[in-house]
Amino acid sequence: MDMTIRPRRLRTTANLRKMVRETRMDKSSLVYPMFVKDGVNIKEEIPTMPGQFRYSVDQIPEILTEMADAGVGNVMLFGIPEHKDAEGSGAYACDGIIQKALEKAKKEVPDLFYIGDVCMCEYTSHGHCGILKGDYVDNDLTLEKLSQIAVSQVQAGADMVAPSDMMDGHIRAIREGLDQNGFLTTPIMSYAVKYASAFYGPFRDAAGSAPAFGDRKSYQMDYHNRREGMKEALLDLEEGADILMVKPAMSYLDMVREIKDATDVPMAAYSVSGEYAMVKAGARLGYVDEAAILCEMAVCAYRAGVDIYMTYFAKEIAGYMDEGRIG
Ligand code: PBG
């Protein structure tokens, strides 16, 4: 048979397959998202996210140390306050839950890199990501609050802020706030390309942040849209975003690749709560192999162009990298 090119030649042994691997990953690119709530001595499992917990501030050093030991150097913190109000004031209070968590984390486990999620939905009584005017989330009124949230988080010790609100002009507003307070070198990782997604369902259970009425479609994007994602990414870059994020990850890797090719900043993707929950549920039922599935999801995200991968499976993925199963 006359066939000079035989792609299977490069797949004959494990060593060779590893040598010619196109996608290489490193633990330093993993980010672990976690939930901190008001109270003491709390470590409660999140029913829709088995294996993930809500921790009170006193309990966080243990999980942070576990991450550090596993080689996961970056953590993203979400706060669950005891009291919520229409203005989401707990989000920017200097003794707010996230601020207290950041202070504790920086003091007890100082070697990790701490990212604050900048949004209002966990803190507002109505569950929306901004300030309401009637039933509509008012963009420009919200900007001022977002800026305050970001500044308060950095004052409490955040190394980077990550706005997930999807308001127009948010990166500019936050950059100005940080700069005016002297935080010129604190980077912003923008959830620039964030779709209105049912994949956030388990997170909203975890954080008690489901909107009390309506949905988030007047600010988060319609998942039918591709070019709009590019528009959001370019706008946030223009406003000063240092890192761009696509969210969710698994069903949105086309956006990762496209934006990666069109821009020159690091690309992040957030494998969200619904992705985690589906893997856990499928594995529990014996329908899929958990380890195999989560490895594949992770590698495929990197193959699509991800530089920073945010995942509730961060520790597991780090372990599989150590074992040489992936990476
Ligand atoms: C806050 C926020 C959400 C998530 C991250 N930041 C919820 C939402 O937009 O409703 C979701 C993360 C996940 O599902 O794991 N706005």
Image: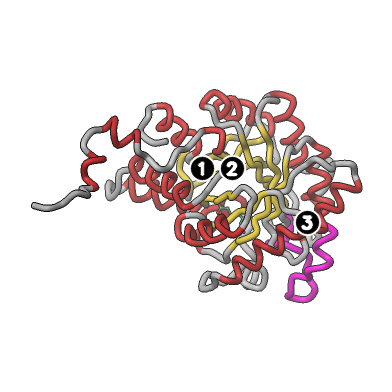
The quadrant of the picture showing ligand 1 is bottom right
Q: Which residue does the numbered mark 1 point to in the structure image? A: 312
Mark 3 or 2: the one toward you: 2
Pointers 2 and 1 in contact (C-beta within 8 Å): yes
| Ligand 1 contact, mark 3 (Cβ < 8 Å) | no
Q: CA distance from mark 2 to mark 1?
A: 6 Å
In magenta segment, residue 141:
yes
Pointers 3 and 2 in contact (C-beta within 8 Å): no
What kind of residue is marked 3?
Answer: Gly
Identity of the residue drawn at 42% across and 44% down: 299
Q: Nearer the viewer, residue 27 or 165?
A: 27
Numbered label attached to residue 33: 2
Mark nearer the N terminus (1 vs 3): 3
Q: Position of residue 256 (x, y in %)?
A: 53, 57
Judge whether residue 177 can be spotted in this image: yes
What kind of residue is marked 2?
Answer: Pro
Judge whether residue 204 can be spotted in this image: no
Magenta residue span: 123-146
Quadrant location, the C terminus: top left
| Ligand 1 contact, mark 1 (Cβ < 8 Å) | yes
Mark 1 or 3: the one toward you: 1
Q: Secondary structure at mark 1?
A: loop
What kind of residue is marked 1?
Answer: Tyr
Identity of the residue drawn at 81% across and 61% down: 143
Mark nearer the N terminus (2 vs 1): 2
Apparent side of residue 85 relative to residue 288 in the rendered image (left or right): right
Neighbour tally class for label 3: few under 14, some 14-19, many 20 plus, Cα within 10 Å: many
Q: Position of residue 153 (x, y in %)?
A: 78, 43
| Ligand 1 contact, mark 2 (Cβ < 8 Å) | yes
